[in-house]
Image (cartoon, helix red, strand yellow):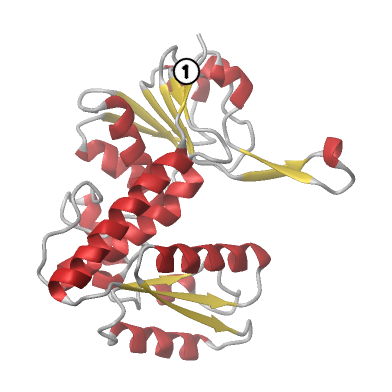
Amino acid sequence: MTADIIDGKAFALTVRSRVAAHVAGLKADHGITPGLAVVLVGEDPASQVYVRAKGKKTVETGMNSFEHTLDAGTSEADLLALIDRLNGDPAVHGILVQLPLPGHIDSAKVLNAIDPAKDADGFHITNVGLLATGQKAMVPCTPLGCLMMLRDRLGSLSGLNAVVVGRSNIVGKPMAQLLLKEHCTVTIAHSRTRDLAGVCRGADILVAAVGRPGMVKGDWIKPGATVIDVGINRVPAPEKGAGKHRIVGDVEFASALEVAGAITPVPGGVGPMTIAILLANTVTACCRANGLPEPDGLTA
């Protein structure tokens, strides 16, 4: 058996198209244009690439993009002042502060300074609590993207055994909460889990989000399981030349491909969905702020 490939690029394109259609409706029917503000502090190359991509996709869907690039030496007080201005700006419906922040800035303090209603990343402690208690929240982009792909692949998830390998606040924990909401039986596993391979073999749905290249082997996977690989790891690729790298996931793709029923590739799986859901979250925030119906199928 060879697993079906879950095409994240194609799925993300579909999501962005639905976002664009909803944005067009908001403009035509209500004279409202959703706006996303992205804040970058410093000159981290990877962060710069992400911010440019987010800005480009925001504009492509018809939304307003507000990019704020600050020096690495920007004080925490100045960053908090900017966030306060964005919180009060009616043209801004979603706010994202690109991580990581420089070491002299308290990331938790900054994220919790964002208005929870404009928290496009879903990291504010209020949204974390709302999600954990099954209430309406802004949901972190990557887990929500994973959930959408699982729904598309499997339909109802009710009663399925789901294992999430990884317990981060950004992916692992919110992913588990979303799967619980879908009536899965959920196990959160991690590097210290006893018999991690055995735990994984019991999963109908296996989500790998640990940041360790190739950690999950093919023989850890239940035959026919759906595997969502969240990992994005740079590893040496000497075959490409000295100093070259390639991107791999947390799952050993070649061996998993022979066992799983379906699997997301890396790259081209979960990654493209993250930006697509960021845009969807911004439109959702805009609709909530204006008392309008939320975009169908783009929320948890």
Q: Residue at x 62, y 77 (%)?
A: 42
Q: Residue at x 21, y 23 (%)?
A: 159
Q: Residue at x 31, y 79 (%)?
A: 92
Circle 1: element type: loop
Q: Residue at x 52, y 35 (%)?
A: 192
From this viewpoint, which residue is outermost toward the front? 28
Q: Return the residue at label 1.
A: 260
Q: Label 1: how many residues lie within 10 Å, few (<14), some (14-19) or many (20+)?
A: many
Who is closer to the viewer here, 224 or 159? 224
State left or right for residue 26 relative to residue 100.
Answer: left
The x, y position of residue 234, in whole percent, is 69, 46
Q: Is residue 170 visible?
A: no
The x, y position of residue 143, in whole percent, is 37, 46
The x, y position of residue 153, in whole percent, is 33, 28
Q: Is residue 255 visible?
A: yes
- Amino acid carrying label 1: it is Ala
Residue 128 to residue 193: above or below: below
Residue 223 to residue 98: above or below: above
State left or right for residue 79 relative to residue 114.
Answer: right
Q: Quadrant of residue 184?
A: top left
Residue 224 to residue 24: above or below: above
Q: Quadrant of residue 206?
A: top left
State left or right for residue 66 relative to residue 254.
Answer: left
The x, y position of residue 291, in whole percent, is 9, 69
